[in-house]
Amino acid sequence: MISASPLLDPTALTGLVDGLVEHGWCVAEGFIDPALCLALQRELADLAQRDALRAAGIGRGDAHELRRDIRGDAIHWLNRESLPQRQYLAAMDTLQHALNIELYLGLFEFEAHFAHYPPGSFYQKHVDSFRGRANRVVSTVLYLNPDWPADGGGEMAIFDPAAPERELARIRPTAGTFVCFLSETVPHEVLPTRLPRASIAGWFRRNASLNGLVDPAR
């Protein structure tokens, strides 16, 4: 039996773990408490207004570079500086525990950042970790956009790991919707958005010392 945080939907938590086992990815609508989503969305809006976001790049360490033709979001790493951040990270602790108990993944920590996509921006198809070269194991995305319209764009497209040109799903970035997938194997893409798009991207990681790897971005 999986025990859930009061900020998580317990039924969705069980379904999320099952979906990750069966397909390598899963989507849970209404996964996070609506009041917490709203508080996080307001915090991100405040960060954007104060010009406290920085342009996101691609690659890690010496290979890091800004490529606006590939990725157009601006980010701010979660650092527990606010109550909503601490509440969200506590909910992710609950999910990490469930994944370790049910799937024996050996997840050691969670890192996450706010992501703001201005109108017209996107993120081309990619995977979040290359096999044997990093320690990100499970990726997460929480959407923070209330009442996202059908024509708003900005969906996440999920592709078949065995046939990366085959699209499996498009996920509208509506507040409370949570996506979880295996970092090394599931290609995904953020389609061009027509409206400002808010989310939190995160990664459950193994301890680098367990496999001799060092992640230069940490």
Image: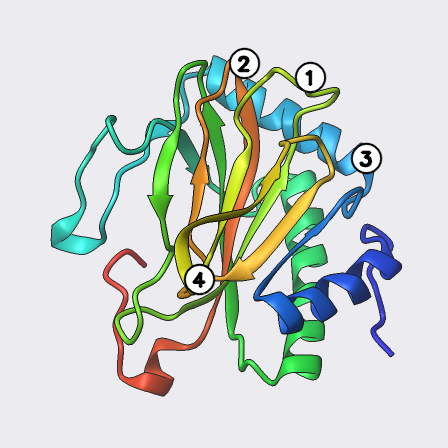
- Residue 101: quadrant of the picture: bottom right
Q: Which residue is mark 2?
A: 195
- State whether residue 145 appears in this view: yes
Q: Position of residue 183 (x, y in %)?
A: 44, 62
In front: label 1 or label 2: 1
Query: Residues under labels 4 and 3: Cα distance?
Result: 32 Å
Query: Residues under labels 2 and 3: Cα distance?
Result: 21 Å
- Residue 6: quadrant of the picture: bottom right
- 52 relative to 120, above or below: below
Secondary structure state at the residue bearing disc 3 = helix
In front: label 2 or label 3: 2
Q: Residues within 10 Å of mark 2 (few under 14, many from 20)?
A: some
In front: label 4 or label 2: 4
Secondary structure state at the residue bearing disc 4 = loop
Tell me the amino acid under the disc marked 3: Pro
- 55 relative to 204, above or below: above
- Residue 173: quadrant of the picture: top right
Q: Which residue is mark 3?
A: 34
Tell me the amino acid under the disc marked 1: Pro
Q: Which residue is mark 4?
A: 161
- 104 relative to 199, above or below: below
Tell me the amino acid under the disc marked 4: Pro
Q: Is residue 10 left or right of residue 111?
A: right
Do the CB atoms of the residues marked 1 and 2 lie less than 8 Å apart? Answer: yes
